[in-house]
């Protein structure tokens, strides 16, 4: 068996391309060299021969052995007959073979780097001798000069070995040097002025408190073996993308490469799919051939199609200048929004049938006297798998990727398979990923299952861009606009138009937040105000505005202007709205649903004004079993997630306890109080002061009838976040 820095070493050659992440596909392996009563390991292909380290003997005559009677290890080579067969091995000639241990070498265009015992002839009585890397330069005739010992400016008592050299200017190797991460670590050294510099540790993304051995670097990936915890067995093969001391997340090669025994010494051919490795799974170290078969199901993925909700409408006669001085031409889009523009771009809230009408309205009376055009627009969502993820992502920030908005009627999905172009894979409908490097990435998704009783598989892909910029920890990026700035100096200070009240009553726009997570349904709208009575979009208060939308929430009518895909387009419109006397605020929507993570200060203010319903995201209900009032572990986690997500430290907190009507009034009231008090105690235990809990109300609710499904809906405690006074 090979034992690092005791008596053995490793062999590698330079120069081939690595093209697989080995995380999405399967391996097939076959033993090609398994000598009896000896070991062979660390295979490398060079000049159509397989090189490896072995303690076998293929000579007649003198055989050198150690004091424990075990043979020394040497470097051998054998012709490759085909992918899974080799000829009779031969030992490398002198001076590349010595009387004692030789191994772990790397061939370059100029020579060979070999690891061997530092002092093989003077201290044979010592049980442990340090290992050093020796360089044999090749002359023009193909023979080798006397070796030069590489000291890396280290003491000769430190062991170095397992070299892998790139271009005779960069070397990865293993060393036992004080100040590392634990056992043997992987280092690198650069050659300057023909001198190899002091080693630099490859860092914590590679090294651990265990031993890291057998490094090699192929086309952007560092491969090595480690006996760290968490592997499949004793020593497993890992790899990480990067160079020098800058490597990304570590990846573990799957079975059957890694086993419960030692697995190490991977070499891959230039095709990136085949190669050799060594393993002790058969009782001794032997050499195996492997072939990797990538998952080809991803080869036929279709790009996702974005649903089309935005259209341009125009009346040709109006654009040609037809006299319309006595009438108003009004578009009615069938979704509550109207416009008086001759040409208008409009975005519908989603899938559905919309009756599009162009009406002629009398300017004086406001009455519709002619329907000039009318037709039905049927908008259908794409029937497809859908990858829900922002188009632009920041490095080092977790991002959720899911398939929740897929639209495949009748599909009973049984399996998900995700693949990122960086090699990451996943197998659930929702997962989270952290991108560490900027650039363009492709996300692919395969869903398989049953559709109408038959096996069904579909594959889609989506491109995203990862930017190396500082990102907000939240989903929004704050953009600040202060009243004293010149850009707002021209705003007229007029009173708000009669008949409508503002959302925020404190003057000018102070903060606008641009939502970071955007998709095809995302839009920004300007909130104009609210009224208790329904206003016609042609009412004087909206004079000069032609793209009004309205929502009736809790008995009040809320009016919004426009629907914009970006704040850069929206900002110039704010000046127009301010000049008309409004005190606008900008809100982010997904379709027609307000983004609950958008501008929390404004959301909390609107909560007071009853803009947000009781089912809004600033309220949490936790349900109980009959007669219970204690929180489960899941309840507590949901409670904490809610408080953190909505930045509860910025709010006062209101608690209500509720019960069904199954007991007496006194019993129900007492149980409701216990539920509210349990919530209060949990808040206090998690750092919320009692003076921020402004109300604890306890009431029992009369459930509709005695149906258990109805009654259990009343067994809850509700926590509401209200504006901080």
Image (cartoon, rainbow, N blue to C red):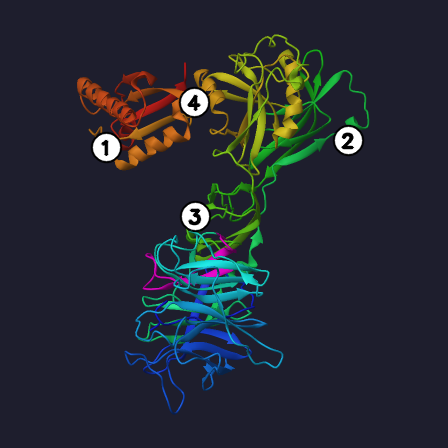
Which residue bears the numbered disc 3?
429
Whole-percent x and y of residue 182? 35, 55
Which numbered disc, 4 or 3, marks the residue closer to the eye? 3
Whole-percent x and y of residue 592? 53, 30
Ranked by sequence position, the earlier of labels 3 and 2 is 2
Ranked by sequence position, the earlier of labels 1 and 4 is 4
Residue at the spot 68% in from the left edge and 17% down from the top edge = 544
Is residue 403 visible in the rendered image? The answer is no
Ranked by sequence position, the earlier of labels 4 and 3 is 3
Residue at the spot 52% in from the left edge and 31% down from the top edge = 476
Kindly state the secondary structure of the residue where label 2 is placed: helix
Q: In the rendering, which numbered label is found on residue 129? A: none
Which residue bears the numbered disc 1?
625
Quadrant of the drawing holding the C terminus = top left
- Residue 233 belongs to magenta span: yes
Q: Which is more toward the observer, 629 or 136?
A: 136
In the image, the segment drawn in magenta is 221-247
CB atoms of marks 2 and 1 within 8 Å: no
Which numbered disc, 2 or 4, marks the residue closer to the eye? 4
Which residue bears the numbered disc 4?
613
C-alpha distance separating marks 2 and 4: 43 Å
Kindly state the secondary structure of the residue where label 4 is placed: loop
Tell which residue pokes out farthest to the front in this image. 122
Kindly state the secondary structure of the residue where label 1 is placed: loop
C-alpha distance separating marks 2 and 1: 64 Å
């Amino acid at each position: 068996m090979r034992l690092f820095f005791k008596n053995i070493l490793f062999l590698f050659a330079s120069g081939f391309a690595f093209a697989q992440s080995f995380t999405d596909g399967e391996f097939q392996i076959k033993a090609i060299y398994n000598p009896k009563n000896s070991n062979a390991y660390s295979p490398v292909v060079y000049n159509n021969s397989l090189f490896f380290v072995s303690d076998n003997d293929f000579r007649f005559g003198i055989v050198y052995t150690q004091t424990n009677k075990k043979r020394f290890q040497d470097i051998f080579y054998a012709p490759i007959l085909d992918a899974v067969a080799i000829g009779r091995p031969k030992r490398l000639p002198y001076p590349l073979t010595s009387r004692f241990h030789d191994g772990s070498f790397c061939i370059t265009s100029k020579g060979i780097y070999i690891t061997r015992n530092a002092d093989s002839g003077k201290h044979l009585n010592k049980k442990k001798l340090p290992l050093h890397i020796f360089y044999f330069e090749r002359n023009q005739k193909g023979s080798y000069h006397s070796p030069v010992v590489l000291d890396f400016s280290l003491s000769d008592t430190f062991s170095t070995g397992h070299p892998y050299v790139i271009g005779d200017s960069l070397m990865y190797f293993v060393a036992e040097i004080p100040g590392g991460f634990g056992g043997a670590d992987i280092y690198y050294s650069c050659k300057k002025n023909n001198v190899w510099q002091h080693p630099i540790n490859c860092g914590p993304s590679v090294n651990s408190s265990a031993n890291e051995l057998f490094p090699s670097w192929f086309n952007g990936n560092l491969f090595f073996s480690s006996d760290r915890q968490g592997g499949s067995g004793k020593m497993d093969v890992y790899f990480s993308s990067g160079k020098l001391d800058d490597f990304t997340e570590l990846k573990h090669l799957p079975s059957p490469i890694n086993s419960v025994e030692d697995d190490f010494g991977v070499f891959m051919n230039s095709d990136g799919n085949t190669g050799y490795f060594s393993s002790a799974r058969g009782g001794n170290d032997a050499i195996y051939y492997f072939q990797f078969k990538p998952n080809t199901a991803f080869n036929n993925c279709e790009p996702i199609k974005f649903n089309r909700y935005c259209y341009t409408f125009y009346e040709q006669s109006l654009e040609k200048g037809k006299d319309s001085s006595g009438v108003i031409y009004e578009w009615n889009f069938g979704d509550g929004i109207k416009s008086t523009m001759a040409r208008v771009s409009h975005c519908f809230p989603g899938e559905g049938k919309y009756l599009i009408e162009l009406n002629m309205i009398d300017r004086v009376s406001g009455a519709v006297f002619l329907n000039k055009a009318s037709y039905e627009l049927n908008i259908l969502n794409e029937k497809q798998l859908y990858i829900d993820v922002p188009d632009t992502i920041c490095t080092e920030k977790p991002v959720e990727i899911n398939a929740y908005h897929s639209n495949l009627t009748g599909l009973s999905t049984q399996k998900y398979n995700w693949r990122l172009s960086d090699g990451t894979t996943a197998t659930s409908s929702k997962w989270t990923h952290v991108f560490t490097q900027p650039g363009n990435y492709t996300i692919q998704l395969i869903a398989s299952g049953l559709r109408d009783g038959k096996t069904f598989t579909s594959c889609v892909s989506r491109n995203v861009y990862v930017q190396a910029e500082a990102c907000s920890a939240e989903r929004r990026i704050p953009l600040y606009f202060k009243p004293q700035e010149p850009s707002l100096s021209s705003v007229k200070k007029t009173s708000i138009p009669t008949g409508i009240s503002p959302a925020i009553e404190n003057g000018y726009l102070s903060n606008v937040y641009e939502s970071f997570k955007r998709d095809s349904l995302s839009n920004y709208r300007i909130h104009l105000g609210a009224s208790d009575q329904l206003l016609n979009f042609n009412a004087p208060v909206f004079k000069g505005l032609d793209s009004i939308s309205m929502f009736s929430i809790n008995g009040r009518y809320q009016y919004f202007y426009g629907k914009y895909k970006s704040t850069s387009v929206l900002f110039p419109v704010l000046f127009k709205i301010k000049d008309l006397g409004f005190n606008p605020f900008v809100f982010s929507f997904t379709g027609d649903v307000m983004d609950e993570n958008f501008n929390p200060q404004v959301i909390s203010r609107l909560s007071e004004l009853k803009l947000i319903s009781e089912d809004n995201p600033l309220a949490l209900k936790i349900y109980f079993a009959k007669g219970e009032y204690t929180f489960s572990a899941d309840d507590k986690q949901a409670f904490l997630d809610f408080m953190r997500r909505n930045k509860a430290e910025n709010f006062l907190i209101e608690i209500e306890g509720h019960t069904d009507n199954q007991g007496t009034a006194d019993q129900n009231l007492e149980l409701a109080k216990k539920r509210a008090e349990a919530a209060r105690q949990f808040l206090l235990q998690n750092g919320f002061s009692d003076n921020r809990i402004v109300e604890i109300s306890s009431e029992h609710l009369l459930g509709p009838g005695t149906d258990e499904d109805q009654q259990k809906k009343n067994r809850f405690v509700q926590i509401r976040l209200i504006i901080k006074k």
